[in-house]
Image (cartoon, rainbow, N blue to C red):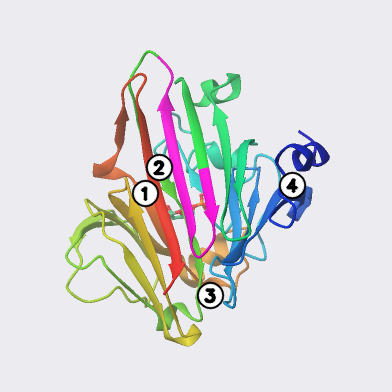
Amino acid sequence: MEREQLNKRFGLPGVVAFGAGPGGLTQATITTAGGTATVLLHGAHVTGYRPTGQEPVLWMSEGSWFAPGKPVRGGVPVCFPWFGSTGPAADSPHHGFARLVQWRVESVRGDADQATIVLTIASDDHTRQLWPREFELRHTVTVGEALSMSLDVRNTGAEAFTITEALHSYFAVSDIRDVAVTGLEGAEYIDTVGEATRLRQGDGPIRFESETDRAYVNTGAPCVLDDPGMGRRITVAKSGSLSTVVWNPWSAKAARMPDYGGDEWPGMVCIETANIHDNAVNVAPGEAHTMDARIRVG
Ligand code: TA6
């Protein structure tokens, strides 16, 4: 649907407007008293969130691609129907296809205090080639005092299916070497730097001294990102999610990524709301599953 039609049908004057975003991709800009956010129809990708009076909460690489069929490096990629390289084929797209396709606007609602956009995709000939299952996927993004995201999958086919998924949130930080993540104390995790190893988080916070790529499992706990350099704490709460991924590529891996500016790695950390590994989700025909993330400063 063209932007003019989107504004006519879904625009909320002064609150939700559709326009050309980076790379000319259609983007919803959501402006409320509590904060602003931007969401691409490409991948239903939240590219920015800035609470009023605060620095941007989400990180975006200067080297990110913004093109149909390409992943965006930053914001909140939607990883579905698989996480990482666990797709059905050797050439399955990393982190699934949901972040690579154009989503449709289903609805917009709200007011100057809080606004919600609902985006959706469903199985079609393209997705069936990648994953022979029937589904509807709905991403509900609410902006106000917090950024709330709700990823709802419904099995519209006759066969049960199992998914892994993530809201792969990239957070802006002063310097990765000075931040700490709490909330995962005592949780079991799979360290995927080098050979995958199962370990257990001690009773202290997660601190970062090198490439870090950990999938914490069987935990519904909220996380707190403590960033003294920016003088803020960011809380990542969740429901319907039993995995949390914590990632920073560090310098060497960052330098190898074509869509990641080489010297940007100190400025970000991913805290991803997920269901992966032990926490893969089985959805019976006609059933649905919802995973929620709620991000706020403080
Ligand atoms: O969430 C961590 C991770 O799985 C890392 O291993 C790294 O691959 C990252 O996701 C980014 O993946 P992408 O496909 O977006 O480059």
Q: Amino acid at mark 3?
A: Gly
Q: Is mark 2 within 8 Å of ligand 1?
A: no
Could you tell me which secondary element the residue under label 3 belongs to? helix
Residue at figure coordinates x 57%, y 21% from the top left: 124
Q: Which residue is mark 1?
A: 274
C-beta proximity under 8 Å, tags 3 and 1? no
Residue 107 versus residue 127: which sits nearer the camera? 107
What's the CA distance linking mark 2 and mark 1?
6 Å
> Who comes first in sequence, dot 1 or dot 4?
4
Q: Which residue is mark 2?
A: 165
Q: Nearer the viewer, mark 3 or mark 1?
A: 1
Quadrant for the N terminus in the image: top right
> Who comes first in sequence, dot 2 or dot 4?
4
Judge whether residue 66 can be spotted in this image: no
Residue at figure coordinates x 47%, y 54% from the top left: 148
Q: Which mark is residue 267?
A: 3
Q: Residue 266 vs residue 88: left or right?
A: right
> Who comes first in sequence, dot 3 or dot 2?
2
> Who comes first in sequence, dot 3 or dot 1?
3
The magenta segment: 140-157
Could you tell me which secondary element the residue under label 1 belongs to? strand
